[in-house]
Amino acid sequence: MNSTNKWTEKVCGMTWGWTGVRGSWTGPEAEFSMERMADMDVNWVAIALSAVQATPQSTEIPFREEPTVTDDEVRWAIRKAKSLGLKVCLKPVVNVANGTWRAHINFFDEEVPGEPSWTEWFRSYGEFIRHYAVIAEEEQCEMLCVGCEMVQADKRDAEWRALIGDVRNVYGGLVTYNCDKYQEERVGWWDAVDIISSSGYYPIDQWEEQLDRIEGTVRRWNKPFFFMEAGCPSREGSASRPNDWSLPGGPSEEEQRQYYEAMFAACAKREWMQGYMLWDWPARLYGVEEASLNDDYCMYGKLAEETVKTFYAAGIRV
């Protein structure tokens, strides 16, 4: 897409449906979830699904198998979002069955006979991403995210460029890559995508210094930027460690609310900051009466729900 450095749209978004377990994206609960999310005055949604490879050194990604949602479920979610007036970023993500975070998927820098390799892995990963690129094109998704937090894979410049080139042969919308927190300046192939995005899980007292750092990358590459992920659990201590979903602590709606207020306030000062796909909004919501006891990222029924809606509704789309 030409002149993407001129893209100035503000993203008031939410991430929906994680992790995309087969059977969870159908029925009244999924419909209610999407409709309730739309009430948050969002204008974008990242529809996020996962495929699961066995180990960090596996080279096959069996995305057509359970637990990954079916193609029919993916198409339903896209169409439902569009029926609610939302723009869609389709976000296929790879996970690891043994619980290892995807950032640790890794192979030898140079191929060794008999050992699993980046070439083998990217062959399977490329098939995975191209499959959803075709769906994104057919369903007219406005954006496609070709990867998420693949820290060890980020260094594979040639493979990413080749994959993105293949994607553009079948998909005509905007292309982004979601790098991990603290990695914005470490990706060397931002010129290959239309938009830079990252996971903005930064401690509540570090927003200014982290935004200063990210600004250097935005200026260097002259690309639009937004946070493909950002958020904080409603849990004691999480404002200082918002990326840690297993942090011990009791439920705290106030902790989550304060985090969002600080994040919005800091980012509002940066004219290059174009928004968020907040983390996250599940396909099956907990009961609203359970909100005060829920200590996860979703802000449904919590104090932060009103904070987010107020900022989005007021047009503070930063």
Image (cartoon, rainbow, N blue to C red):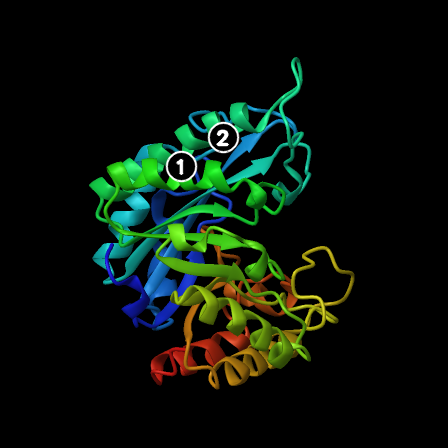
* Image location (x, y in percent) of residue 67: 50, 31
* Image location (x, y in percent) of residue 89: 35, 53
Compared with residue 237, is residue 58 higher up or lower down, i.e. above or below?
Answer: above
Mark found first going from the N terminus, 2 or 1: 2
Residue sitting at 67 percent across and 41 percent down? 104
Compared with residue 229, is residue 203 higher up or lower down, i.e. above or below?
Answer: below
* Image location (x, y in percent) of residue 81: 29, 55
Compared with residue 4, is residue 106 higher up or lower down, i.e. above or below?
Answer: above
Along the viewing direction, whichever of 164 and 274 lies nearer the viewer: 164
As drawn, the label of residue 10 is none
How dense is the environment of label 1, judged by Cα within 10 Å: few (below 14), some, or many (20 and up)? some
What is the secondary structure assignment of the residue under circle 1?
helix
- Please say if the residues under marks 2 and 1 sit with CB atoms less than 8 Å apart: yes
How dense is the environment of label 2, judged by Cα within 10 Å: few (below 14), some, or many (20 and up)? many
Along the viewing direction, whichever of 191 and 273 lies nearer the viewer: 191
Q: Quadrant of residue 59?
A: top right
As drawn, the label of residue 122 is 2
Q: Which residue is mark 1?
A: 163
For the question of whether residue 27 can be seen, the reply is: yes
Screen quadrant of the C terminus: bottom left
